[in-house]
Image (cartoon, rainbow, N blue to C red):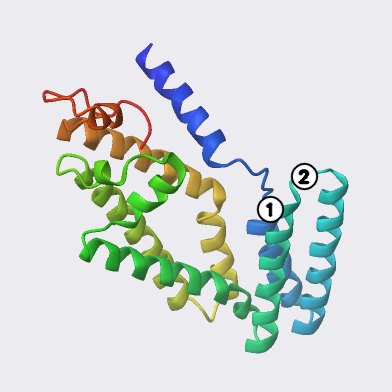
Amino acid sequence: MKFSKKLKEIRDELKTLSPNDEKIFDSIIAPIFFVLVSNFFNLNFAIITTGIVIFGFLILRLFQKQKTKYVFYGAIGSLLALAFAKFQGTASGFFIPGIIRDSIFSIIGVISILLGKPFTIYTSKAFRKWPNNWYFHSQVKPAYVLVAYIWTIYLFLKAVLQIYFFENAQILVLIKLATSNQTTLLLLVITYLIGQKKLLKLAGPSVEEFKNNTPPPWSSQQQGF
């Protein structure tokens, strides 16, 4: 009963955290198609054909009445990656924006932890709108520090692997596939569960208990992170 309740909670959280109907094309199919074509034809032909395919999918999704904002952002991201490939002169250039993004986020993660203000607090606060002081409570904050460590290590390793194998576009595609949106969602679920378990272990106040200045012992935050 408890497991089914937790499963439903996670499903509800994922629906709320991922409101856009983002398709797999922008994160997986576009780089696979580009690298595959570049193996058999020259770079310019691969860039042009991939650009045409991206534009075709953009038009298709607009006709399917998907959320325009997310469809547009996905297409812009893929076209930007093609521009980097053209400028850099190899198929590997397609992955430069992702490498830069992962590197910057991992650096931000390290800095935020060192400053005692883990970025996970602010990502949660932006979504939850919970009181800022609650996150920094001595029996709450360590849970967010722990999750910040996990995400920072993940992004750091992802960036390092891409830099190390930068000359091999085929391996970069495999890394992209292994760290796709589905993998990110899985890590999101895992860190959500780890964070909640840590909150319970810390036995700090729930958000409502904190707001109401309820004295200990506290029930801790039972849902959400």
**Which amino acid does the dot numbered 2 rest on?**
Gln
Q: Residue at x 36, y 28 (%)?
A: 223
Residue in view at x 48 percent, y 49 percent: 184
Look at the image and tell me in which quarter the C terminus lies.
top left
Q: Between residues 170 and 117, which one lies in front from this camera angle?
A: 117
Residue 135 is left or right of residue 162, and the answer is left
Task: Identify the residue position indicated by label 1 in the image.
Answer: 70
State the residue position of label 2.
66
Q: Measured from the top left, where is residue 178 in percent x and y?
A: 51, 55
Q: Nearer the viewer, residue 44 or 185?
A: 185
Q: For marks 1 and 2, give the CA distance.
A: 8 Å
State the quadrant of the N terminus: top left
User: Residue 200 falls in which quadrant of the image?
Assistant: top left
- In front: 23, or 67? 67
Q: Amino acid at mark 1?
A: Tyr
Mark 2, Cα crowd under 10 Å, few <14 / some 14-19 / many 20+, is some
Q: Quadrant of residue 154?
A: bottom left
What's the residue at 52%, 36% (across, down)? 14
